[in-house]
């Protein structure tokens, strides 16, 4: 059974940085494309970033492009999301997700492509 656990959320001041981590267990991490999504208060879940199985292909939401770096360490079965210049509107629960069906270069922005989800980690950006 695939399990995803996110780490690294918390409270940060506007303009600050935060790094989220997500560890996968129960299967071979390098077989999965990985994605990050978020859901803010009163909002629908939205795409943040994704990375292909090998890490060679990345995909970012336009709203956050330039402020994010997604990366992965297949030896540690972990995907990371480095966020910079955070804004109060970035406040949300951030979820990582794993996709087994996409090809080698897939890094989908569609939540429907992802098969497993973590429980989420809260990120709060104070103004």
Image (tube, rainbow, N blue to C red):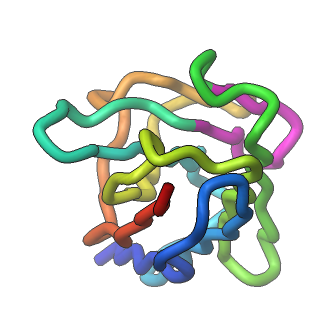
Give the image location of residue 81, x and y in percent: 67, 58
Please say whether residue 108 is one of the residues in the magenta stretch.
no
Q: Nearer the viewer, residue 14 or 58?
A: 14
Please say whether residue 56 is one of the residues in the magenta stretch.
yes
Outermost residue to the left:
42
Q: Tell me the residue at 76%/52% (across/down).
A: 84
Residue 52, placed above or below residue 91: above
Residue 26 visible in the shown view: yes
Q: Tell me the residue at 69%/69% (across/down).
A: 19
Q: Which residues are magenta?
A: 49-60
Q: Nearer the viewer, residue 30 or 51?
A: 51
Residue 107 found in image quarter: top right
Across the whole image, how many numbered discs are drawn on residues? 0
**In the visual, does 125 lie left or right of 107?**
left
Residue 99 found in image quarter: top left
Outermost residue to the front:
127
Residue 45, placed above or below residue 8: above
């Amino acid at each position: 059974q695939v399990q995803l656990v996110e780490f690294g959320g918390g409270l940060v001041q506007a303009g600050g940085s935060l790094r989220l981590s997500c560890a996968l267990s129960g299967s071979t991490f390098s077989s999965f494309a990985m994605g990050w999504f978020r859901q803010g208060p009163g909002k629908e879940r939205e795409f943040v970033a994704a990375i292909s199985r090998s890490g060679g292909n990345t995909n970012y939401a336009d709203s956050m492009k330039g402020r994010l770096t997604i990366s992965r360490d297949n030896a540690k079965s972990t995907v990371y999301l480095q966020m910079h210049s955070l804004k109060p509107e970035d406040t949300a629960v951030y979820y990582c997700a794993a996709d087994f069906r996409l090809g080698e270069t897939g890094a989908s922005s569609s939540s429907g492509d992802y098969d497993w989800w973590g429980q989420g980690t809260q990120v709060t950006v104070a103004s």
